[in-house]
Amino acid sequence: MVSRALILLYALVSYALFTISFLYSLGFVGNYVVPKSIDKSIDAGPPSNLAAAIIVNLLLMSLFAIQHSIMARPAFKRWSAKFLPASCQRSTYVLLSSLILLLLFWQWRPIPTPIWQTSGRAAWLLIAVHWLGWLIAFASTHMIDHFDLFGLRQALVAWRGTEMPSQSFRTPLLYKIVRHPLMLGFLLAFWATPEMTAGHLLFALANTAYILVALQFEERDLIAEFGATYQDYRRHVPMLVPRLFVRRQTEGAPR
């Protein structure tokens, strides 16, 4: 039997790795501070083998997508419950996601061929949208339950020896405007750049495709969990693109 102290320590380590990977991703996507980013590496210059760079980058993103999608499914959670305490499941998901992200940052092959370049007000506008995307992504995790999303709440409940409370359906703040503000934030952060390179474009396209596909599975799981309540929410609130005129919505939010 896994001790409650070990479960809490495991959750804290997982959350620490998530924090590192998230902070590095800011520099990676935006080409800030970090030694290796989406367009820059220690050995600057175009890749010696363009095809190999594309294949490696796609494999790295596919590894993240596969892990992220499979482990999020209810069927996998039921299977993993046979040998992994429920209080550790989310932390394990966060830990593996963070490790794969760090692997991606480490092994990424920059392809610095320019696609577009802007300057002046247009560049500043794109930079502002880029950081707005990261802000939306981070803020949306706190609008639902940041610590539940990253496994700390489950570990604290196990530490106290109490039962996890049941999840209710809510639509706080940005969830009244779009159903998936977290993914909207990522899309803005990935696409809004004053200097789009071939490598950055590959990253943005692959992740956009993954997000659009993954959301279909997530929506299916939410319908299975919340039934008609979520169906009504879908009818009133768009998935990713906010409506100019917002109609009255139902009270309730996806978890």
Image (tube, rainbow, N blue to C red):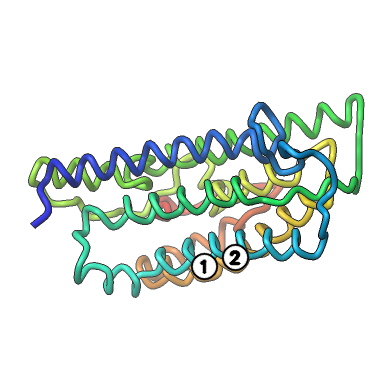
Q: CB of mark 2 within 8 Å of CB of mark 1?
A: yes
| Residue nearest the viewer, comparing 96 with 242 | 96
For this view, does 225 lie left or right of residue 113? left
Looking at the rendered image, the quarter that the N terminus falls into is bottom left
Amino acid on which the number 1 mark rests in the picture? Ile
Tag on residue 122?
A: none
Q: Is residue 132 visible?
A: no
Mark 1: which secondary structure? helix
How far apart are the two marked residues, 2 and 1, measured between alpha carbons?
6 Å
Residue at 50% in and 54% down: 100
How would you rate the neighbour count of disc 1 (Cα within 10 Å): few for under 14, some for 14-19, many for 20 or more? Answer: few
How would you rate the neighbour count of disc 2 (Cα within 10 Å): few for under 14, some for 14-19, many for 20 or more? Answer: some
| Residue nearest the viewer, comparing 212 with 150 | 150
Amino acid on which the number 2 mark rests in the picture? Ser
Q: Residue 136 in the image: x percent, y percent? A: 58, 38
Q: Residue 174 in the image: x percent, y percent? A: 54, 42
Residue wearing tag 1: 66
Q: Residue 123 in the image: x percent, y percent? A: 85, 30
| Residue nearest the viewer, comparing 251 with 205 | 205
Q: Is residue 20 above or below residue 197?
A: above
Residue 39 lies in quadrant = top right
Q: Residue 150 in the image: x percent, y percent? A: 37, 45
Residue wearing tag 2: 62
Mark 2: which secondary structure? helix
Looking at the rendered image, the quarter that the C terminus falls into is bottom left
For this view, does 154 lie left or right of residue 35? left
